[in-house]
Amino acid sequence: MKKKLISMLLTGVMAASLLAGCGGTAAPAAPAAPAAEAPAEEAPAEEAEEKVEEVAEDVEEAAEEVKEEAADAGSGELISVGFAQVGHESDWRTASTKSCQDVFSKENGYDLSFVDCDNDEAAQKEAVRSFIEQGVDYIIIDPIIATGWDTVLTECEDAGIPVIVIDRTIDDSDKYVSWVGSDFLTEGKAAGEWLKAYVDAQGIKEVNALIIQGTIGSSAQIGRTDGFQEIADREGWTVLDKQTGDFTEAGGQEVMESYCKSYAGKFNVVICENDNEAFGAMTAMDNAGVKYGPGNDVILISYDACTAGLKEVQAGKITADFECNPLAAPTVEGVIKTLESGGTPEAQILVPDNWYALKDAIVDFSVDGNAQKMIEVTDEVIEAQY
Ligand code: GZL
């Protein structure tokens, strides 16, 4: 359409210039019928004027059409986004999914293809390939585990579709535009450094810890396990066992039931790598008669700090909860907007995390030399959480 308008404008300019520059005489577009009465020198001028008027009308009409089309294109042209989500295993994941669906809505100018990959790595790769088939404008991936990605990311690159990684990281390929998420290693170190400050303040001399890990091979699990282990090694703590609960409540309960049998009376710290595992571990400890929470035998530490997790902190069950922010979608949208405007987004964009406890469990500690701030859990804090 725009090409049509441009050619009309050029015709109009040519006709006008012939009218003006050659004393109003213009070579008629086609052999015109001889003017009956008008003297020969006037006929071409009139024809040219008519031509200019005709073209002017056409130009106006075409301009109108271009304006209408542009308006249509503006309102109707959605940016298509394919999102391959980990699954629906936790409260955290529910919040993450809702955030993405709220941001990438039709009202906001997006056509979202969402696939819940149900914690199945093969299904996640299949979802990404389906997005390539669809020819989406952008692909967002929250990778179930951190490896095995280079082949399918190469296919995205070959298809010319930019990939943005949200939340967990991809560690064996750099064929994506940006990663937006939390620093899982810092989360693990924060839990370890807080525990060091807390047991010192409580006069607890020994730490015998049990860890319920997240999905093995996910960057969230790797970071949290490694970060805490670094502090445990430095402090000479004993980590009695580490098993995966796969970030689910059922998984946390199953592992904790086994721990309560194998390590009865031998542990005083339980670290769950997300709140849903902590909920399951609480059920198992309740059933086994193990007392946990501030002032009890076992210190229970958790990650995510979702609303339900903070309620368990307030109830004196979870002693400290280390947040992982699930609301990265608005930042991912910022990456897409930068790309849409021809800019280059940052390769890594961290979203902020906070640490939570009740007043008596708030102690001063640092991570890698950086003093940390803990937030006291109150009704207002819980109300505002995700
Ligand atoms: C962390 C995220 C983890 C959460 C779990 O960024 O990937 O996955 O900690 C979720 O709750 O299952």
Image (cartoon, rainbow, N blue to C red):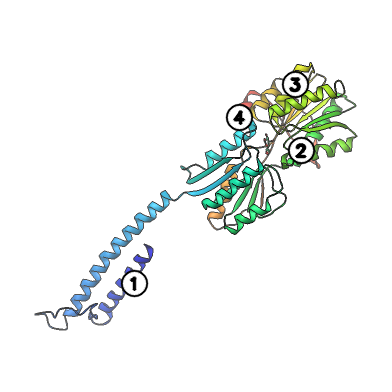
Mark 4 residue type: Ala
Whether label 2 lies within 8 Å of ligand 1 gets the answer no
Lower position in the chain sequence, tag 4 or tag 3: 3
The structure residue drawn at horizontal position 54% and vertical position 52%, both measured from the top left corner, is 133
Query: Label 4 belongs to which residue?
Result: 384
For the residues bearing labels 2 and 3, Cβ distance under 8 angstroms: no
Q: Nearer the viewer, mark 4 or mark 3?
A: 3
Q: In the rendering, at what x and y percent does residue 50 appear?
A: 20, 71
x and y percentages locating residue 373 in the rendered image: 73, 34
The mark closer to the camera, 2 or 4, is 2
Q: Residues within 10 Å of mark 4 (few under 14, many from 20)?
A: few
Give residue 185's quadrant in the image. Answer: top right
Q: Going 31% across and 62% down the picture, which residue do you hit?
A: 62
The residue where tag 2 is placed is 224
Residue 380 screen position, x and y as percent = 62, 25
The amino acid sitting under disc 2 is: Arg
Residues at marks 2 and 4 touching, judged by CB atoms closer than 8 Å = no
Say which residue label 1 marks: 10
Decide: few, some or many residues near mark 3? Use Cα within 10 Å; few <14, some 14-19, many ≥20. many
In the rendered structure, which disc, 2 or 4, sits on the residue that comes first in sequence? 2
Please state which of residues 381 and 104 is positioned toward the viewer in this rendering.
104
In primary-sequence order, the first of circles 2 and 3 is 2
Residue 14 location, quadrant = bottom left
Q: Which residue in the structure is indicated by mark 3?
A: 284
Please state which amino acid type lies under the numbered disc 3.
Answer: Ala
